Amino acid sequence: MELKNNILEQWWNSVIGFRAEVFGISTLHASKNRTTERDGQLRVVDTENLRQILSQRELSKDQLIQKLQTHIQNGASLRTSLFQGALEQYVPSLELVNRKLPFGLAETGLCFQPSGGPSCPDEVTQSSLVWFCSPRTSSQWLDYWARHRLQWWRKFALGPSDFSCSDITEEELAGRASRGVKIVYNFPWGQEALETLLSRGDAELLQTHKSARNKLQCLDGRKSVVPYAISVTGNLERGVLAYLYNSLQQVKKVDSKQRLQQRKVLKLHPILSPVKVALDMGRGATVELRQVCEGLLKEFLEGGVSAWPGYLETMPTSMEQLNTKYDEMGVLFTVVISDNTLESGLLQVRSRDTTIKETMHISEVKNFLARYISAAQNI
């Protein structure tokens, strides 16, 4: 969950913070007013009313079908993507940009996809940027956003070459757009799309606003035009899976007895890693060491550094086992509090990526972690 939240936060910063003309919006999960959804839309129905209709034995077959259709049509439709919400927010957003192109509307949230059977719909966390631009520059803008999005996915990757960009075939487009590009990850079982970029023209915007061209027109230089919409839609669950696969490494090492040792390390980017530091106790006065750990944990959390309270573990575990566990969790650093900390304030800090153990004063640890994370943000 934390990994997905971190990816969402970075996506939001990369879109909203990247260009001043992009604005965040929030739209409803369900609405009774959406008339432009495609066939196969999902609706919320009152099951008690449905049960009552089905129990009316006196109804003929045609009457029953009519009542069921009316009941279903009166239900609110669940959103299957965030695109429609952006189209609905287009007109209210025009004042923000003084009716000048280009500009974009961004949103992240839960969407519902048909499962292909009688079971519950699949829940998908989507990221969405809808970029409104001049028809004459729509192709250039599609290329622009495709480059930007590919660079973003690769920024946090251990193996950037596993992320790539490809054109969507006309068969795959199926009339949804004039042109499309997808950002894909090369999973062991094949490529899957993480983000899909489509140049969708103006038809859906006109349909949403009942072809009111005057209300939709914006300035492209001195010319008034109805803009084209470019949609950038991401699947965050698939993005999480891609980064997990991309970050998992099998590290081989020959020990002092010339034996080959292998360990799994989840080398997530420091910004994405859910846990930045684990706190553990060495041998010593348990009560006093625990108090130091609790104080340091509080300091980390107040400073926005996510920490794992390993000192609360009741089962006896060697440091080697703990290091293996934390490497597999993707924890960046392990801090060990010992008797030496009580005497001199010194503690041990182990790095996930280098396995090097450093000694530093307890007063320096928080700033050390903050500097490390800040530097990783700017890579």
Image (cartoon, grey):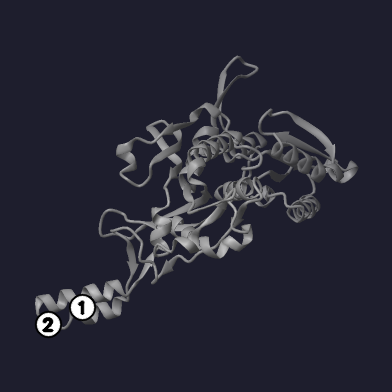
How crowded is the residue under tag 1: few (<14 C-alpha within 10 Å), some, or many (20+)? some
**In terms of depth relative to the viewer, which is nearer, 377 or 265?**
377
Secondary structure at numbered mark 1: helix
Q: Is residue 292 left or right of residue 131?
A: right
Identify the residue at image location x=41%, y=30%. 188
| Residue 337, horizontal then vertical, whole percent | 78, 43
Q: Earlier in the sequence, mark 2 or mark 1?
A: 2
Q: Amino acid at mark 2?
A: Leu
Q: Secondary structure at mark 2?
A: loop
From what the image shows, is residue 30 above or below residue 199? Answer: below
Residue linked to disc 1: 67
Residue 354 visible in the shown view = yes
| Real-space Cα separation, disc 2 to disc 1, in angstroms | 9 Å
**For mark 2, what is the residue?**
59
Q: Spot the residue most to the bottom.
A: 58
Q: Position of residue 172 (x, y in %)?
A: 32, 40
Left or right: residue 145 compared with residue 16 = left
Residue at horizontal 41 percent and vertical 39 percent from the top: 180
